[in-house]
Image (tube, helix red, strand yellow):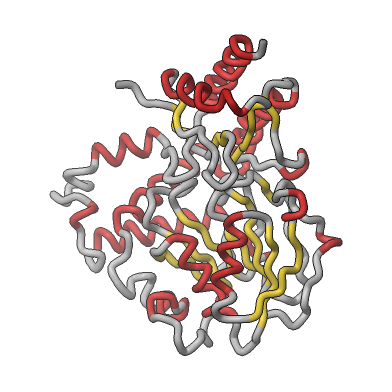
Amino acid sequence: MSRVYNFAAGPAILPEPVLEQAAQEMLDWHGSGTSVMEMSHRGKEFINIAAQAERDLRELLAIPQNYKVLFLQGGATLQFAGVPMNLLRGRRSADYVNTGEWSKKAIKEAKRYCAVNVAASSEDKNFSYAPKQASWKLDPDAAYVHYISNETIGGVEFHWVPDTGGVPLVADMSSHILSRPIDVSKYALIYAGAQKNIGPAGLTIVIVREDLIGGALPLTPSVLDYKGQAEADSMLNTPATYAVYIAGLVFRWLKQLGGLPEMERINRAKAAVLYDFLDQTEFYYSPVAREDRSLMNVPFRLRNDALDAEFLKQAKARGLTELKGHRSVGGMRASIYNAMPAAGVKALVDFMDEFQGTHGG
């Protein structure tokens, strides 16, 4: 069976060259006689794999030297707790921006550890836009300001970096990290689950400024204490070794491609094909404000939602899978991460045009 075009939001499509290399190295990594899955995380082979992965990630994102890179587990969801546990540092409240389902989950978790000030929200328009900076009501005494820079479910992306003054800025970048260059120095902490643009599920990246490490809440589990993890090179316990290895291959693939500027060019071109089609049809529509549309997650709807099931059935028969929208919002969603080829987006648009012709009446 040939490979399908997988539009899943995560775990998501991986670059075929990465999968091919991993397959070639499955039984014997570089003459070691063993699979990376079987390696000791304390052995020199895996330590070299992890170190190279960190070097490549630092190069891709131009991460300043005064930031630690942690390879952790538990997904971005665990960092909903890890962030307040580590960054409150004696303060009693934090600012959060509410732009969708993942923001709400982060806010709910943070309330276990501190008072939460919802500094801005787009709930008034069903989370279809990113609130303008002028509407934010920030607390200068907050421990940090937290936002989801790309809402996977709602397809809303911040194409600008918030100005939070002297208050540390924290971003969950799970669904668009490595899709374009970012200025890491503008953030106190960035975290991201790997299963969208980095690698397989099981790995979480945390990039944190060194001066914010230390002073975690006394109740913080040791595996969530950034200081302890940094001192142990992310190996306080057994890390997600194979996920780190695959992530390293993805980082190398991105470098060979031309780095993040080239990746951004490709992503903008792919997204334009789909959004341009949505904008010229009455059969489908995008629910997201034009200036805040995500380059990675494209939710769309059929004007006649009675056709949804048939659309999904025919799409799957054409090798276009995982297009059903999240259960909390319905509709359709095409996640077109870094590894989605332009041919996949074209195949989707061609099918959508054909389906419209057949069912548009």
Residue displayed at 22% across by 53% down: 37
Confirm whether residue 176 shows in the render: yes
Q: Position of residue 256 (x, y in %)?
A: 47, 39
Residue displayed at 65% across by 35% down: 268
Q: Quadrant of the C terminus?
A: top right
**Tag count in the figure?**
0
With respect to residue 90, does 86 lie above or below? above
For the residue pair 326 and 232, the one nearer the viewer reads as 326
Q: Position of residue 176 (x, y in %)?
A: 57, 48
50 vs 158, left or right, is left
158 vs 326, left or right, is right
Residue occupying the far front of the picture: 306
Q: Position of residue 85 (x, y in %)?
A: 52, 79
For the residue pair 153 and 167, the one nearer the viewer reads as 153
With respect to residue 102, does 251 lie above or below? above
With respect to residue 66, does 152 lie above or below? above
Quadrant in the rendering for residue 15: top left
Q: Quadrant of the N terminus?
A: top left
Residue displayed at 58% across by 15% down: 355
With respect to residue 253, does 352 lie above or below? above
For the residue pair 229 and 133, the one nearer the viewer reads as 133
Residue occupying the far left of the picture: 33
Quadrant in the rendering for residue 148: bottom right
Q: Position of residue 247 (x, y in %)?
A: 40, 50
